[in-house]
Amino acid sequence: MPLDSLPEWALAQQRVIGERIRAARRQAGMSQVQLGEAVGRDHKTVHRWETALTAPTLMDLILIAHAVNVPLAELVR
């Protein structure tokens, strides 16, 4: 399925996950640059996740959860 044909509910969930990543990063006192360094990604990629321009992979989510010290389930619930 091409990404441009995702149902609206999936895109909405992607936005929610981005908001949770941002909130968890801020709660951890990290900048986008610091989170990017912690997970091996560019700060621009972190920005794209947080604004739902792109979706993090499962491995990205695992690394993010570890970096900000929250359960993975908290990011994707």
Image (cartoon, rainbow, N blue to C red):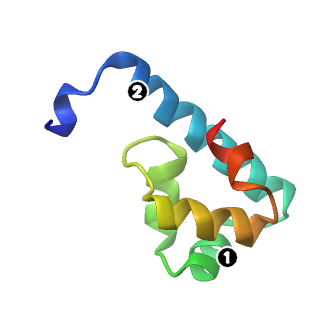
Q: Secondary structure at mark 1?
A: helix
- Name the front one of labels 1 and 2: 2
Query: Which residue occupies the extreme top position in the image?
Result: 8
Identify the image quadrant of the N terminus. top left
**Where residue 59 appears, x then y in whole percent?**
49, 67
Looking at the rendered structure, which numbered label has been put on residue 43? none
Number of dots carrying numbers: 2
Say which amino acid is labelled 2.
Answer: Ala
**Where residue 51 appears, x then y in whole percent?**
49, 42
**Residue identified by numbered label 2:** 10
- Above or below for 39 versus 2: below
Lower sequence index among marks 1 and 2: 2
Number of residues whose C-alpha sits closer than 10 Å to that of mark 1, classed few (under 14), some (14–19) or many (20 or more): some
- Above or below for 65 versus 3: below
**Residue identified by numbered label 1:** 34
Q: Secondary structure at mark 2?
A: helix
What residue appears at the point 58 percent right and 77 percent down from the top-left corner? 39
Q: Are marks 1 and 2 in contact (CB under 8 Å)?
A: no
**Where residue 75 appears, x then y in whole percent?**
67, 46
Say which amino acid is labelled 1.
Answer: Gln
Name which quarter of the figure residue 9 lies in: top left
What residue appears at the point 58 percent right and 32 percent down from the top-left corner? 16
